[in-house]
Image: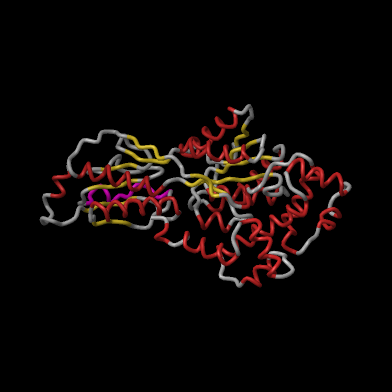
Amino acid sequence: MPDRARSRRPAGEPPHVALVVQTSMAYGRRILEGVARYSREHGPWSFYLEPRSRQDPFPAWLESWDGDGVILSVSRPAGPASPRMPTVDLDDQGGRPHVQSDHRAIGALAAEHLLERGFRRFAFFGYLGFRWSTANYQGFAARVRREGFECRLYRGGQKASWGHQIPAWEEEMETASRWIASLPKPLGLMACNDFRGVQALEACRRAGVSVPDEVAVVGADDDPIACELAHPALSSVIPDCRTIGYEAAARLDRLMRGDRVGRSTVIVPPLGVAVRRSSEFTAIADPCLAEAVRYIREHACRGIRVDDVLDSVTVSRSKLQRLFREELGRTIHETIARERIRLVERLLIETELGYEDIARRSGFAYLGYMSTVFRRATGLSPAAYRRQHSRSRRPDAAS
């Protein structure tokens, strides 16, 4: 089949490759980055690409398109069963060579993250009828069951708000908020992707459930838009999408050269967990301690003192200090300082604010004190910390 298309091209013209991959979310765009890297190293290739969402159907034009190869990701195929040319599938839908995330490993990694934080109750918030969501759940549930715990599965969402189905959002939130309110706390919850994670956080808000104090939430895909728009910012498992794209391109290259690849399968494991506020928490069973920690998280950067924390609960100073030391391994004062330092770190990395402004926003009385506490906690001055992380965030630093 590759000779049919290539025989009509002038000598030396690069192969024409269609990228039928969703571009609406970071997951697909990072896959395309991996494809682009392979093309730079082994090409060049000439790409056909159009904007797509995850739920867009099989493109009708592909059946008659005069190209050399296709990298295909269609969640719910419609129309022709297969392009009539070399194709690598990213969804394992058509018996072709395919490359995909290890979705079970993604679920297991989310479970591991929550187990490390001391959670003993778990739930999964996914989509019914999607294989990748089911695989996430299977990996998540299997990992917590290995430790002797159970996992509650959300069985609502028959009209899940996915893709263009936004009118179902309000109905979905009512169902999900009742479900979350009914679950025992503290709870570690995985959402099958980051946009589902945003819904989980909204359901918690409507249910009057505090995140992460009562429910810690972890998504998947590490989509920066969804994770940073979420409140609080959403922790997420990081899939290795660039490797998926690179490996898919490598297999397509072999197919276009006439090599036999067969129905080979490449499963790519995730990279880790991007920890943000939604799960940056240790599960606390004692209600007085949980209330004190919640108060600190909400007010630490407003200049509160230990006495303010004591006024927020109904136990003595000695008992609360003992609970902090026994359960968290630090004092009330150290916990307040830790929350302030976390905000300093985030502002140094994510903003261009001056150091006086950062000190003020973080609850420190003056810059010198902030610098002293920050150096004690991190081993770096605020300026050195900003320089170090500025270098690590440059685009060429990750390549």
For residue 343: magenta?
A: no
Q: Quadrant of the N terminus?
A: top left
For residue 63: magenta?
A: yes
Give the camera-side residue of 43 and 262: 43
The percent position of residue 125, horizontal first and vertical second, equals: 58, 41
Q: Quadrant of the C terminus?
A: bottom left
Left or right: 278, with 4 as reference point: right
Report the residue at 56% width, 57% height from top: 228
Report the residue at 75% width, 39% height from top: 285
Up the image or down, 281 lies above or below 141; here it is below
Q: How many callouts does the rendering have?
A: 0
The percent position of residue 268, horizontal first and vertical second, equals: 40, 40
Give the camera-side residue of 1 and 216: 216
Q: Main secondary structure of the magenta part?
A: loop
Left or right: 324, with 338 as reference point: right
> How has the structure been colored for display?
secondary structure
The percent position of residue 355, horizontal first and vertical second, equals: 63, 70
Give the camera-side residue of 13 and 110: 110
Left or right: 279, with 32 as reference point: right
Report the residue at 53% width, 39% height from top: 109
Give the camera-side residue of 204 and 394: 394
Report the residue at 57% width, 48% height from top: 197
Up the image or down, 177 lies above or below 120; here it is below
The percent position of residue 242, horizontal first and vertical second, equals: 38, 49
Q: Which residues are magenta?
A: 55-65
